[in-house]
Amino acid sequence: MRKLLWTTLSLCLILMNGIAQESSDKKTTFSFGGFAKLDFMSTIFYNGEPTLDSPIRDIHLPSVIPVGGNKTFDTHFHVKESRFNFDLNTELNGKKVHTYIELDFLLSKQGDQRVSNSYSPRIRHFYFTYGKWIFGQTWSNFMNVIIPDDLDFAGAAEGIVFNRQPQVRYSTNNGLWLISWSKTQCWRKR
């Protein structure tokens, strides 16, 4: 993933450098966006206490609900769902080029109240498109991006595919057919 990320970053920077020189033609647009969100969670665990770095302290994940132990009460605050993004659109050789990066801080195990409550940034999306091609990390072909609004970031976690991954994707017929290749992890025997 690091190689794909650095390759994508390098390509984006090369494109941005070439585009920055052409930005006087009014075909290039830049935007910066995002939001800040404060979460307050108060939970009663009837069968144990989650560890301090458990993801259930950030979002509802049924697989990490503690089992075995005493009834505990947990109150937790964080701003980890806050996110920011940078968006670039232009034309290159008559084709639309779109570069997008979005970061948040969710599921970060860095920092605590004794130091600075720091959170590590996490890449949600980082890709560029050229014509009908997408290169980088974004929603998989199997992700239904129309998720019902929910207070919990994971949304309706049960029964919904929730997957962003590095990929190369080609779309045809105005996005009716999507063909992608992704290899997020490779195991090999030595």
Image (cartoon, rainbow, N blue to C red):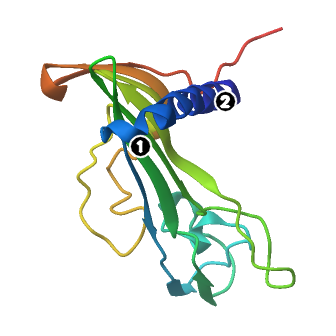
| Relative side of 108 to 143, left or right | right
Q: Give whichever of 60, 169 is nearer the camera.
A: 169
Is 107 situated above or below 38?
A: above
168 is higher (above) or lower (below) than 155: above
- The residue at 38%/28% (across/down) is 129
Residue 114: percent from left, percent from top: 86, 84
Which mark is drawn over residue 88? Answer: 1
Q: Secondary structure at mark 2?
A: helix
Q: The C terminus lies in which quarter of the figure?
A: top right
Q: Foreground mark, 2 or 1?
A: 1
Outermost front residue: 24
**Where, by quadrant of the figure, is residue 168 drawn?**
top left
Residue 133 visible in this rendered orientation of the protein: yes
Q: Residues within 10 Å of mark 1 (few under 14, many from 20)?
A: some
Q: Residue furthest right?
A: 114
Task: Residue 151: name its quadrant.
Answer: bottom left
Q: Secondary structure at mark 1?
A: strand
| Residue 139 shows in this picture | no
Q: Which amino acid type is marked by label 1?
A: Leu
Amino acid carrying label 2: it is: Trp
Nearest the camera: 56 or 123? 123
Residue 184 percent location from the top left of the image: 58, 27
Q: CA distance from mark 2 to mark 1?
A: 18 Å
Q: Quadrant of the N terminus?
A: top right
Say which residue label 2 marks.
6
Measured from the top left, where is residue 153 in percent x and y? Answer: 43, 66
Q: As drawn, is 30 to the left or to the right of 4?
A: left
* Residue drawn at point x = 40 percent, y = 47 percent: 162
41 relative to 68 in the view: left or right:
left
